[in-house]
């Protein structure tokens, strides 16, 4: 229903670029920091859990890699973005609704549900999978740093683990999740903003709902995708 | 020409409009007047299709607004300009970007052509050289005029203005009235203005729709106001003792002229 024929493509293009910049550049730092630590914690935690078992040491590299690719990088990144980008989009659109900007655009003949939503979804679908790839990479680096600094592993062991049991299917799974989660978090945020009523308190609630619903739906989708894609 | 027919509108259990019939004429400044809360904004929003009436029809020439599909509505709206009660200028865009927005959205003109049009509209409202300011950096009266400039940039056939001169000093208010009136006459468009300002009524009221308690209480033009026997209208227009004295004097002058 949202994807109708737009007015002037160049306006959509410009808006998409602006959104891509906002989502991408604006989120780089937090995603970098969070994922370094996620990788590090995964490594430390599994080293502890596996110590004293007969599982070879180099498995840590493998575990860190697949945890990052299959689950942690994409889910954590999406949840962080549901908070950061979701609340941002909901309050941007909601503010425009309350200040009658949306009505003003409607009167000009702009198809607002399309002009305000489509560039955001497009931008998210392009940028978030890139951020997720980056997140996975950073997470693996985090795991590497943590294992090497703990002193109980050698560089070679970790790399050997990284190279073991690699399934391209898992990377595909990461991207499927990234696309689905991006769509979920932006569409929920835009919906909450677009249909906001009342004043600044309601706007606050709408942006909170965007985040809360976004996270819940992402985690539910995560479960179903896991069942479907691994089944 | 816009015609409304039997317009009713209720919000929950409050009935705001109770059957309005009126003809808004082309080439004239049509005024919707009435007390604060009379339903002027609601009627105006019904006219442009932002609010759906509970019952009734809005005719643009021979087309019924209420039965238009989305595409027809968008086509119609390319011919509509509107100034909102709260201006609704896009606050993260400069003045020029605000006025250029409809051009950017709907035309294939070059940037230079668009600039020329923007500057023409800004000149029309007596605001030159503020292209790169933001709405928050200019005064309320200037914002109103920028709003007018934006609403005429696509040369509308129908122009709507919700209280274009509220909150302004009388001189500026009159200038805005004159501006709207001359835009209407120059381009022979249908202009509909909400107001509760008696100056506007007496200066530019070509065709007046007086709303009271959800009904059309009185209709006429500015020269009929003074001698109308309608008491509600008289109380509304000549609200203060000072204005009443002015009115009595004016009536006396009329008598002696006759
Ligand atoms: N969305 C809405 N929901 C419920 N009631 C509304 C809504 N919009 C307007 N009303 C009611 O309709 C009535 C008329 O409102 P409206 O804004 O049309 O008044 P107005 O004539 O424009 O007044 P003013 O001169 O102060 O702008 C008011 O009593 C208001 O409470
Ligand atoms: Mg009003």
Image (spheres, helix red, strand yellow):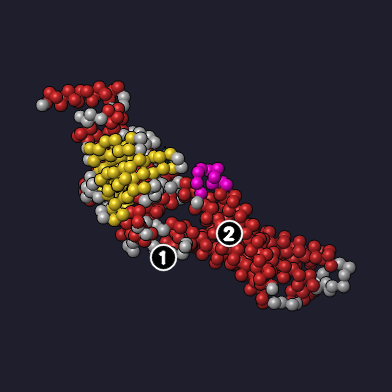
Q: Quadrant of the C terminus of chain A?
A: bottom right
Relative side of A130 to B189, left or right: right
- Front residue of this view, candidates B238 and B106: B238
Tell me the residue at 75%/77% (across/down).
A164
Q: Position of residue A122 (x, y in %)?
A: 51, 64
- Locate residue B109: give its quadrant: bottom left
Marks 2 and 1 sit apart, C-alpha to C-alpha, by: 23 Å
Q: Which residues are magenta?
A: A196-205
Q: Position of residue A54 (x, y in %)?
A: 87, 73
Asked if residue A229 is positioned above or below residue B139 in the image, the reply reads below
Asked if residue B254 is positioned above or below residue A230 in the image, the reply reads above
Main secondary-structure element of the magenta-colored stretch:
helix
Residue linked to disc 1: A5
Label 2's element?
Answer: helix
Ligand 1 is within 8 Å of the C-beta of the residue at disc 1: no
Residue linked to disc 2: A185
Q: Is residue B152 visible?
A: no
Q: Is residue B16 magenta?
A: no
Tell me the residue at 19%/25% (across/down).
B251
């Amino acid at each position: 229903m949202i994807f109708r024929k737009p007015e002037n493509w160049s306006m959509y293009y410009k808006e998409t670029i602006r959104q891509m910049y906002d989502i991408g550049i604006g989120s780089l730092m937090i995603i970098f920091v969070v994922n370094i630590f996620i990788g590090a914690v995964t490594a430390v935690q599994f080293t502890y859990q596996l110590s004293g078992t007969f599982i070879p040491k180099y498995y840590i590299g493998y575990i860190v890699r697949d945890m990052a690719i299959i689950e942690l990088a994409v889910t954590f990144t999406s949840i962080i973005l549901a908070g950061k980008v979701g609340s941002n989009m909901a309050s941007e659109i909601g503010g425009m609704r309350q200040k009658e900007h949306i009505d003003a655009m409607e009167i000009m003949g702009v198809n607002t549900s399309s002009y305000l939503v489509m560039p955001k979804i497009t931008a998210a679908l392009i940028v978030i999978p890139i951020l997720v790839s980056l997140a996975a990479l950073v997470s693996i680096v985090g795991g590497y740093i943590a294992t090497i600094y703990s002193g109980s592993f050698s560089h070679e062991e970790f790399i050997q683990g990284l190279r073991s049991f690699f399934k391209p299917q898992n990377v595909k799974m990461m991207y499927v999740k990234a696309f689905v989660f991006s769509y979920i978090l932006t569409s929920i945020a835009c919906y909450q903003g677009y249909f906001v009523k009342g004043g600044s308190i309601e706007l606050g609630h709408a942006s909170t709902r965007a985040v809360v619903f976004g996270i819940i739906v992402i985690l539910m989708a995560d479960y179903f995708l896991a069942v479907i894609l691994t089944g | 020409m816009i015609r409304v027919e039997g317009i009713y509108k209720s919000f929950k259990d409050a009935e705001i409009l109770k059957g309005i019939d009126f003809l808004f004429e082309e080439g004239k400044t049509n005024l919707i007047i009435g007390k604060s809360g009379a339903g002027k904004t609601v009627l105006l929003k019904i006219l442009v299709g932002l609010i759906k009436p509970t019952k009734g029809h809005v005719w643009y020439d021979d087309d019924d607004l209420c039965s238009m599909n989305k595409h027809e509505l968008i086509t119609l709206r390319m011919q509509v300009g509107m100034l909102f009660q709260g201006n609704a200028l896009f606050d993260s865009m400069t003045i020029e970007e605000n006025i250029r927005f409809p051009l950017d959205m709907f035309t294939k003109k070059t940037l230079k052509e668009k600039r020329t049009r923007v500057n023409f509209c800004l000149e029309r409202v007596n605001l030159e050289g503020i292209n790169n300011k933001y709405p928050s950096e200019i005064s309320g009266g200037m914002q109103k005029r920028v709003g007018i400039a934006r609403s005429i940039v696509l040369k509308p056939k129908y122009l709507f203005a919700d209280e274009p001169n509220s909150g302004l000093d009388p001189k500026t208010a009159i200038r805005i009235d004159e501006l709207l009136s001359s835009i209407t006459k120059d381009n022979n468009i249908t202009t509909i203005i909400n107001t509760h300002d008696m100056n506007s009524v007496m200066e530019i009221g070509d065709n007046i729709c007086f709303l009271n308690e959800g009904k059309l209480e009185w209709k006429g033009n500015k020269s009929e106001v003074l001698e109308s026997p309608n008491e509600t209208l008289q109380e509304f227009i000549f609200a203060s003792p000072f204005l009443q004295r002015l009115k009595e004097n004016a009536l006396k002058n009329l008598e002696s002229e006759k």
